[in-house]
Image (spheres, rainbow, N blue to C red):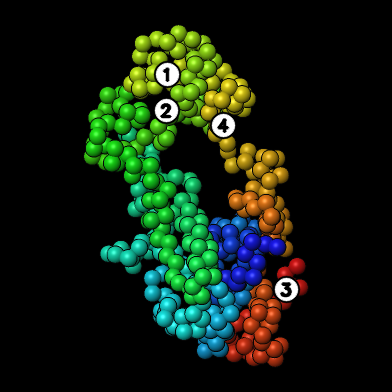
Amino acid sequence: MKALEGVKILDFTHVQSGPTCTQLLAWFGADVIKVERPGAGDATRKQLVDVPNADSLYFTMLNHNKRSITIDTKNPKGKEVLERLIKTCDVLVENFAPGALDRMGFSWERIQELNPRMIMASVKGFGPGKYEDCKVYENVAQCAGGSASTTGFLDGLPMVTGAQIGDTGTGLHLAIGIVTALYHREKSGRGQKVLAPMQDGVLNLCRVKLRDQQRLASGPLKEYSQYGEGIAFGEATPRAGNDSGGGQPGRILKCKGWETDPNAYTYFITQAAAWDKICDLIGEPDWKTAPGYDKPVHRLDKLNKIFNRIEQWTMTKTKFEVMDICNPLDIPVGPILSMKEIMDDEGLRKTGTIVQVDHPERGPYFSVGCPIKLSDSPVEVTRSPLLGEHTSEILTQVLGYSDDEVAQLKEAGATEVVKKAAAE
């Protein structure tokens, strides 16, 4: 039995943040019914297209394990279908612009009238306040949530990260909120609203930087490289390059082959407990007891010298050799893995973190699988739906429409019916 088997999700999401959330719920066994516009669907179906006449990877990799129904919500008959879906489903998830559902005639009050047990989950750019009506994208969220101001090097521009912490990060937060609301409903019998603002989600992922903001009141942040370089701290948490954020000094260091391979690097942490082993490894045994090197606090103003010496050693090894040598010594290191290396990793494929999926239009492709593993509820990743592929199936099997009624809905322009057989 799947963990969320029996839970029906009415998925009004598009692009990335909302689909991330609903895909995770689908992986856990929820029946996710993706509502799309006839003839168009989710905008990402045709964004960054790499295979002609096929859904893009942008869409397919965010909509696994779902069913697609097309509904014209401006059509009176289409609205009737939507009302029926609201009465039938457990959760409605949306990431429309603020007020869009109200304009469709489905305010929170109306949804509660139709289904008092309904949970309505929303992604918005900002929470309630002066910016709540602003439109927000991934990089805007990173900037407004504190990530960009603390990412990059001290003498450079603020930087956004390649990790989609604004969109995907918020989607994961929303999924947690939905599951929590479902659990609460078991006791209360009623649904509730769940809100996940993107700014809030990014800030939650940047909490150590908010920690450091408050530590500045007590003096310089000594684990930051700029302390050892004699650069004064300002009023706000600075950009720290590749310094470790956990208090244990760490840097990205060159490895053998760095001249031609842009990813021939390793992350190396000089954890206090491993200091003696590090000194022996790099040929500096005297540092174990030398004044100014023997204690972690004494080493903070010498981090550049220390890491330069460690880098002299790492440059004689590949990033994987560094891993093989340091791991048995409990020295924390990690190779900088490219997306190609990750996609080809046999271990990640074996655990289902990287999966290969077949698609009727584009053929086989690789995708990220479920990042969370449940021992009694294994995840099987199935392909994303074609536009409107399950319309007839949902109308008849979920909502109880007869075949004649389905034909009437199509004739009235409320929906498009796509036969599943034609999709295979």
Q: Residue at x 56, y 73 (%)?
A: 90
Q: Amino acid at mark 1?
A: Ile
The three-letter code of the residue at mark 4 reads: Pro
Q: Which residue is mark 4?
A: 335
Q: Position of residue 383 (x, y in %)?
A: 68, 61
Q: Secondary structure at mark 3?
A: helix
Rendered residue at 63%/38% (across/down) = 341
| Residue 306 disc label | 1
Which tag, 2 or 3, sits closer to the chain's start?
2
* First of labels 2, 4 by sequence position: 2
The residue where tag 3 is placed is 420
Estimate the spatial distance between the alpha carbons at disc 1 and disc 4, rounded to whole Å. Answer: 19 Å
Task: Estimate the x, y position of residue 188 in percent, counting from the top left.
Answer: 49, 73
What residue type is disc 2 on? Pro
Is the residue 59 above or below the residue 372 in the image? below
Q: Position of residue 15 (x, y in %)?
A: 51, 62
Disc 1 versus disc 3: nearer the observer: 1
Describe residue 151's horizontal placement relative to residue 172 as left or right: left
User: Label 4 near label 1: C-beta < 8 Å?
Assistant: no
Under mark 3, the amino acid is Lys
Residue bearing mark 2: 249
Of badges 2 and 3, the one in the foreground is 2
* Labelled pair 1, 3 in contact (Cβ < 8 Å): no
Query: Can see residue 193?
Result: yes
Q: Name the residue at 42% across, 18% down.
A: 306
Image quadrant where residue 86 sits: bottom right
Q: Residues within 10 Å of mark 4 (few under 14, many from 20)?
A: many
